[in-house]
């Protein structure tokens, strides 16, 4: 996209409160699904990984099924990867993995490709959400300064893919499903898992297998937090110029973009509002929400991965996060020598994918008994 800013094609005014609490998102998401696009409106040449060189061996998305958010201010892209026809039972009962990417990423990364290839090979459907401002979704490029808004969007994504409705413009899966995410996406998947477990849609909750979180962004090394005066300046600048990148981390997607020619991933300095949101989330919000029991993770099963050499999220933070989760069946797997990009290196990614599908198979078997 070359830095092009994608905006919503609609002219709705932004409401005074553009976000929704998690439960409200689940109870009122039908409106967004009634406005979902059909495959006929989608340019199939823009499917994830369709631009890969011939013979690359990459798995290409089967379809795209974007949806309007409940408040009408964004259109979020969902890439769908289906197993071969006849490989499993009825299409509406295929088990589904719902994936949320990390900051600055998209559905064209090695994380998505490796998980999608494993899903297709094992008879699972995979749905990959592209967050607002990322990939093919609308929004200012790379800007995601409102974590509660992101949470609402992921809740709506779950309902769009797996909600118990007769709306055939949604994906309409009635089979078991699980949530998965990396880094920021891992945190968003955790909050969405709580929303599913507490949903008034009990049919949805009964089909929920659990969540697999890959290097979730649940903490930060205190030494990496700037002095208070710098943090204060960041807050002021983020409010004044949310999409501007000044003295913020610089993103280079070349090590995780797949195919290498993909332009879906953000490149350049992080927008100020995005940097502020991540700093607040990792230094305070997750810990506060666990302490106040807003984030309890009382879910069927929880699988968490951490790299022993993760310089972005300290392994101690992930250990504390895991220990606070209420899931009876919970596992923390530390990957020796791995850093924050667990899914970008072939060796660590193979380990993670293998463990995820061993876990998924055991959970699906349990729910079917």
Image (tube, rainbow, N blue to C red):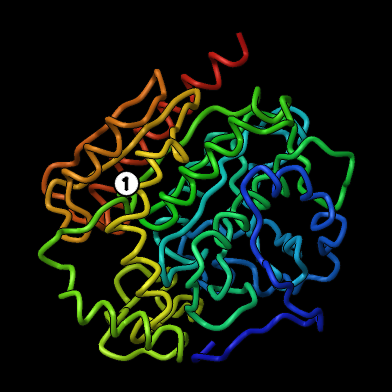
- Mark 1 sits on what residue? 287
Q: Nearer the viewer, residue 43 or 339?
A: 339
Question: Does residue 4 sit above or below 123 in this rendering?
Answer: below
Q: Nearer the viewer, residue 246 or 62?
A: 246
Q: Is residue 291 left or right of residue 299?
A: left
Dot 1 crowding, Cα within 10 Å, few <14, some 14–19, many 20+: some
SS category of the residue bearing label 1 = helix
Quadrant in which residue 339 is drawn: bottom left
Q: Position of residue 67 (x, y in %)?
A: 75, 62
Question: Does residue 292 sit above or below 283 in this rendering?
Answer: above
The residue located at (31%, 55%) in the rendering is: 284
Q: Nearer the viewer, residue 283 or 130?
A: 283
Quadrant in which residue 165 is drawn: top right
Q: Position of residue 351 (x, y in %)?
A: 28, 39
Q: Is residue 301 left or right of residue 29?
A: left
Question: Does residue 301 sit above or below 50 in this rendering?
Answer: above
The residue located at (48%, 81%) in the rendering is: 263
Quadrant location of the C terminus? top right
The residue located at (36%, 79%) in the rendering is: 235
Q: Position of residue 118 (x, y in %)?
A: 47, 42
Q: Is residue 60 left or right of residue 226?
A: right
């Amino acid at each position: 996209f070359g830095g092009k800013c994608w905006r919503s094609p609609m002219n709705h005014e932004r409401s005074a409160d553009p976000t929704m609490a998690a439960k409200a998102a689940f109870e009122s998401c039908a409106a967004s699904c009634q406005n979902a696009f059909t495959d006929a409106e989608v340019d199939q040449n823009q499917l994830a990984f369709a631009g890969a060189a011939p013979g690359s061996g990459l798995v290409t998305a089967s379809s795209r099924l974007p949806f309007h958010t409940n408040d009408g201010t964004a259109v979020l892209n969902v890439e769908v990867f289906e197993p071969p026809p006849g490989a499993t039972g009825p299409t509406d009962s295929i088990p589904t993995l719902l994936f949320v990417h990390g900051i600055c990423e998209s559905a064209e990364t090695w994380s998505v490709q490796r998980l999608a290839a494993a899903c297709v090979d094992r008879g699972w459907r995979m749905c990959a959400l592209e967050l607002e401002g990322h990939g093919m979704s609308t929004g200012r490029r790379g800007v995601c300064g409102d974590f509660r808004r992101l949470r609402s969007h992921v809740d709506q994504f779950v309902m769009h893919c797996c909600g118990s409705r007769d709306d055939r413009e949604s994906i309409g899966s009635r089979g078991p499903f699980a949530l998965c995410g990396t880094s920021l996406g891992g945190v968003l998947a955790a909050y969405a898992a709580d929303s599913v477990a507490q949903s008034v849609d009990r049919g949805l909750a009964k089909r929920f297998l659990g969540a697999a979180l890959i290097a979730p962004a649940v903490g930060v090394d205190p030494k990496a937090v700037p002095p208070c005066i710098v943090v204060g300046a960041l807050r002021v600048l983020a409010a004044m110029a949310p999409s501007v990148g000044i003295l913020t981390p610089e993103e280079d997607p070349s090590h995780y973009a797949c195919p290498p020619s993909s332009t879906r991933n953000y490149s350049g300095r992080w927008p100020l509002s995005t940097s502020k949101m991540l700093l607040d989330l990792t230094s305070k919000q997750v810990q506060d929400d666990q302490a106040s029991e807003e984030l309890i993770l009382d879910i069927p099963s929880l699988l968490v991965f951490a790299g022993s050499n993760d310089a972005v999220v300290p392994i101690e933070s992930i250990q504390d996060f895991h220990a606070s989760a209420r899931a009876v069946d919970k596992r923390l797997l530390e990957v020796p020598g791995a850093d924050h990009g667990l899914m970008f290196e072939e060796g660590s990614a193979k380990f993670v994918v293998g463990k995820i599908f061993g876990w998924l198979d055991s959970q699906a078997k349990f729910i079917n008994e």
